[in-house]
Amino acid sequence: MPRVLLVEDNEMNRDMLSRRLIKVGYEVAMAFDGAQGVEMAQAGPWDIILMDMSLPVIDGWEATRQIRATPGLDKIPIIALTAHAMAGDRDKAMDAGCSDYDTKPVEITRLLGKMTALLEPKA
């Protein structure tokens, strides 16, 4: 069962995403802000991280950079989840170290496809 770290400060988004991910076979743990996300990522192990970009304490871009700077965590897929859909936001997320990018509101089928594609090389 793949282990997912969901870093999301919005309770409704956490609830919706975690229930849907659990339903299709993922084990889900949740962090509520960027600092907690970094701590939990470092405590791992995780197969994939879903990172909201607009987080309290440390935003998702900085949290991703800190996770990527941690030895051994540079290969874990991180998908940016953001309502930021402006030109250049995808590039900003990728530059921070994200493996992929998805916009909110999350379309679960699209997100699951991205997760599967990133996890397949590990299988």
Image (cartoon, rainbow, N blue to C red):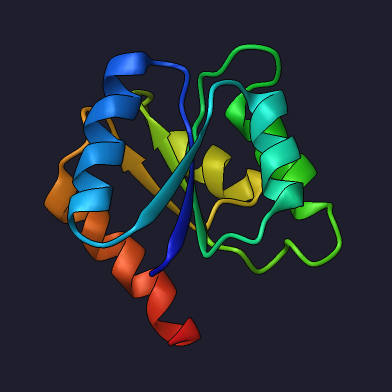
Q: Give the residue displayed 50% in from the left and 59% down from the top.
A: 48
Q: Which residue lies furthest to the top in this view?
A: 56
In the image shown, does 67 or 43 lie closer to the viewer? 43
Query: In the picture, which quadrant includes the C terminus?
Result: bottom left
Looking at the image, is 11 positioned above or below residue 3? Answer: above
Residue 119 can be seen, yes or no:
yes
Q: Is residue 45 left or right of residue 22?
A: right
How many numbered circles are shown?
A: 0
Q: In which quarter of the image is residue 1?
A: bottom left
Residue 55 horizontal/vertical position (percent): 55, 18
In the image shown, does 53 or 76 lie closer to the viewer? 76
Residue 35 horizontal/vertical position (percent): 72, 25
Q: Give the residue displayed 53% in from the left and 62% down from the top.
A: 77
Q: Is residue 9 left or right of residue 40?
A: left
Q: In which quarter of the image is residue 57?
A: top right
In the image shown, does 10 or 25 lie closer to the viewer? 25
Residue 88 can be seen, yes or no:
no
Residue 66 horizontal/vertical position (percent): 78, 41
Q: Quadrant of residue 34?
A: top right
Q: Give the residue displayed 63% in from the left and 22% down from the top.
A: 59
Residue 61 horizontal/vertical position (percent): 63, 33
Q: Give the residue displayed 54% in from the left and 41% down from the top.
A: 93
Looking at the image, is 99 positioned above or below residue 51? Answer: below
Looking at the image, is 14 positioned above or below residue 56? Answer: below
Looking at the image, is 42 positioned above or below residue 77? Answer: above
